[in-house]
């Protein structure tokens, strides 16, 4: 299955410049751009003892001054780079793609038309609810659960929702083939919101939002309908798996024939599949295998009228961003203001950029890299990756807790790790996608249908090893367990992560730790269950697996103890993979830096040693200030811990950090050597 895409970050902020790396584009440095060796000294708070709070030591002055833009939930390294990327994308959308080849030119006309449809606010306003009126009529006309299943399937090319998720990805046991996976679905919020008393206020806000949207589309008895929908979703939530449980690749791999699925979880599956375009499907993988039959049973006993109201609400919720102002405002108030603490709606152009970028991202990326990415950076990243790979190899060879036979398998996996840098070799073909400059809702539906049918049409072909699951302009990176590969889009290959002009310690602490993070995902609690060929298989001896689990459990307990708000704890199990990747990544990057020095002493710059600058850069790359609401939402469902713990919770497990900053037992972050987590 396809539970891979692991983000290095879901968040954050810059103080550091966002110059393009010697590219043809304009290097517009941002206010507060870092000069000199690559660390923003003015953003640090050197009055803090580094051993008490390293995040504040490195980033405190910045944090105190940083102001979250009113139309965002955070500011920081990631957000600032994203702001720059959005402005560049806007320029591409508004001014077309001069200087690119002709096939990219055809795509450019299409993205321009799509954006024009989004920006035609007068037309969107005049149409109001009209673009979804035929869809609402289809829901009203449905008489049976079978007919509703038809609509759920049609949602792949429209805005209908399904009580089950259907996805197509590599088969965990045969990753050269695609397989269809069936999983839990049907919820408008993460399951915890329905079931956790401390989150009851958000649940009440959600109920009010349901009622509001149902009233806006003229649904009968919106108040009673919303209450019934909430009861239905709460019942579904009660049988749904947590995000932490869903991280287990063994428990989520449950292959089943279509006939066995019918037996285990009676539901109009064939109607759903046929409507999704999945014809002749003989087997599937069931992800949450105890939840799926229970959700089918809840579906079977829920009145059809309630299911129709549920479908109508989710239709309005999904389509609202593309409708008139009153819909956009209602959707923003709940999804962004209430849930993420965003004060003001983003300007229309930003939402247009997000929509077109989300649908035709590679068409934009193709122009983006031609304008803003320097090919030399690709070679430099190649070199860094080689250094990191060699450093992790050394660490595996030196492990005192792993048997020689498991080490051999681990080293084989590392040797086979594939790397993709900056942008795809092969660009996506958007020629089947039809876009009109005057029909926004139809364009969004066409984009959804295009994305889904592209996957359906290749279901019986070998897995596409050239696939990119992120766009080149995205400020992020991921590891894919089935392809055993890591992918670094051009968007993250810029300061403060990477700058050819910066001090090497800064690059190793920035992009080096990012590369190490993705590399370590292949060996975190989830990734370690896949072998070098990307097959879900147990290549560990029992004793080695027990050692790994015991060490990981210590890290889990450390993170469980972190409390961003009184009574609100980080979930050590949910964030386990990311925390292991952060720790492994930082250790490997530091080793690679030392190897780069080759025994020569690092220069002292502004009074800081090489190791000190490495750690300062690491902390700088996690600079972020987020709204309280967004941190609360993150802690509920996001596998990444809040940034302060991604810094403090990591460095305190690294011996070199104690040496670099002379950290003593009286310091708050101090851990005795035998309590420091040592995995990779
Ligand atoms: Zn990650």
Image (tube, helix red, strand yellow):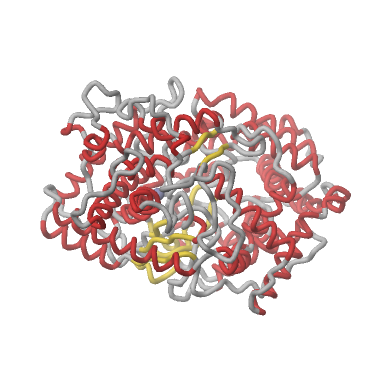
Q: Residue at x 52, y 40 (%)?
A: 76
- Residue 354 at what x, y percent from top left? 65, 53
Residue 338 against residue 219 in the figure, above or below: above
- Residue 675 at what x, y percent from top left? 20, 32
Q: Work out which residue is located at the far bottom of the displayed protein and give it.
A: 102
- Residue 122 at what x, y percent from top left? 87, 51
Q: Residue at x 19, y 49 (%)?
A: 545
- Asked if residue 358 lies left or right of residue 521, the reply is right
- Asked if residue 53 lies left or right of residue 101, the reply is left
Residue 635 against residue 274 in the figure, above or below: above
Q: Quadrant of the N terminus?
A: bottom left
Q: Which is nearer the eye, 469 or 47?
A: 47
Q: Which is nearer the eye, 35 or 370?
A: 35
Based on the displayed image, in which of its 4 quarters is residue 388 positioned? bottom left
Based on the displayed image, in which of its 4 quarters is residue 99 positioned? bottom right
Q: Residue at x 50, y 23 (%)?
A: 198
- Asked if residue 453 lies left or right of residue 591, the reply is right
Residue 219 seen in render: yes
Residue 452 seen in render: no
Q: Residue at x 26, y 66 (%)?
A: 415
């Amino acid at each position: 299955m396809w539970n891979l895409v692991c983000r290095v970050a879901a968040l954050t902020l810059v103080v550091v410049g966002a110059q393009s790396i010697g590219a043809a584009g304009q290097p517009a440095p941002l206010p507060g751009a870092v000069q000199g060796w690559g660390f923003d000294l003015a953003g640090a708070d050197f009055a803090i003892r580094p051993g008490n709070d390293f995040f504040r030591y490195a980033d405190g002055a910045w944090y105190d001054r940083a102001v979250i833009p009113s139309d965002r939930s955070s500011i920081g390294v990631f957000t600032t780079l994203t702001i720059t990327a959005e402005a560049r994308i806007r320029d591409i959308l508004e001014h077309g793609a001069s200087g690119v080849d002709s096939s990219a030119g055809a795509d450019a006309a299409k993205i321009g038309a799509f954006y024009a449809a989004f920006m035609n606010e007068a037309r969107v306003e005049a149409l109001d609810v009209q673009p979804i009126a035929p869809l609402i009529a289809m829901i009203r006309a449905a008489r049976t659960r079978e007919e509703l299943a038809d609509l759920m399937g049609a949602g792949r090319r429209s805005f209908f929702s399904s009580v089950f998720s259907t996805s197509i990805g590599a088969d965990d046991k045969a990753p050269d083939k695609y397989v269809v996976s069936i999983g839990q679905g049907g919820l408008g919020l993460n399951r915890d919101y329905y079931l956790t008393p401390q989150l009851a206020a958000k649940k009440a806000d959600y109920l009010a939002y349901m009622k509001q949207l149902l009233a806006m589309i003229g649904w009968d008895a919106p108040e009673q309908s919303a209450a019934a929908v909430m009861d239905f979703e709460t019942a579904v939530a009660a049988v749904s798996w947590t995000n932490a449980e869903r991280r287990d690749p063994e428990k989520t791999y449950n292959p089943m024939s279509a006939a066995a699925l019918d037996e285990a979880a009676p539901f109009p599956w064939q109607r759903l599949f046929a409507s999704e375009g999945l014809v002749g499907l003989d087997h599937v993988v069931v992800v949450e295998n105890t939840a799926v039959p229970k959700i089918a049973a809840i579906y079977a006993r829920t009145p059809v009228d309630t299911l129709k109201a549920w479908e109508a609400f989710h239709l309005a919720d999904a389509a609202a961003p593309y409708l008139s102002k009153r819909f956009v405002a209602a959707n923003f108030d709940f999804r962004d203001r209430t849930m993420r603490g965003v004060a003001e709606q983003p300007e229309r152009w930003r939402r247009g950029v997000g929509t077109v970028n989300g649908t035709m991202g590679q068409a934009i990326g193709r122009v983006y890299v031609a304008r803003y990415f320097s090919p030399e950076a690709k070679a430099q990243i190649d070199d860094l990756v080689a250094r990191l790979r060699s450093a992790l190899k050394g660490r595996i060879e030196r492990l005192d807790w792993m048997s020689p036979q498991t080490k051999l398998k681990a080293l084989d996996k590392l040797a086979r790790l594939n790397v993709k840098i900056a942008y795809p070799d092969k660009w996506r073909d958007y020629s089947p996608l039809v876009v009109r400059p005057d029909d926004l809702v139809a364009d969004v539906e066409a984009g959804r249908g295009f994305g889904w049918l592209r996957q359906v049409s290749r279901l019986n072909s070998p897995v596409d090893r050239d696939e990119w699951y992120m766009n080149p302009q995205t400020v992020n990176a991921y590891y894919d367990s089935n392809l055993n590969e890591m992918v670094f889009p051009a968007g993250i290959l810029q300061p403060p992560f990477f700058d050819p002009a910066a001090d090497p310690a800064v690059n190793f602490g920035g992009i080096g730790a990012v590369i190490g993070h993705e590399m370590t995902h292949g060996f975190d609690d989830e990734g370690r269950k896949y072998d070098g060929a990307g097959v879900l298989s147990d290549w560990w001896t029992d004793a080695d697996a027990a050692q790994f689990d015991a060490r990981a459990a210590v890290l889990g307990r450390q993170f469980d103890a972190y409390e961003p708000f009184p009574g609100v704890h980080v979930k050590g199990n949910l964030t386990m993979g990311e925390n292991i990747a952060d720790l492994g990544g930082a250790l490997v990057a530091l080793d690679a830096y030392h190897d780069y020095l080759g025994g020569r002493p690092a220069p002292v710059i502004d009074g800081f040693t090489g190791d000190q600058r490495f750690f300062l850069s690491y902390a700088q790359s996690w600079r972020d200030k987020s709204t309280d609401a967004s941190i609360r939402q993150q802690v509920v469902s996001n596998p990444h811990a809040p940034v302060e713990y991604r810094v403090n919770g990591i460095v305190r497990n690294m011996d070199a950090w104690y040496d670099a900053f002379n950290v003593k037992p009286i310091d708050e972050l101090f851990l005795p050597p035998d309590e420091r987590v040592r995995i990779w």
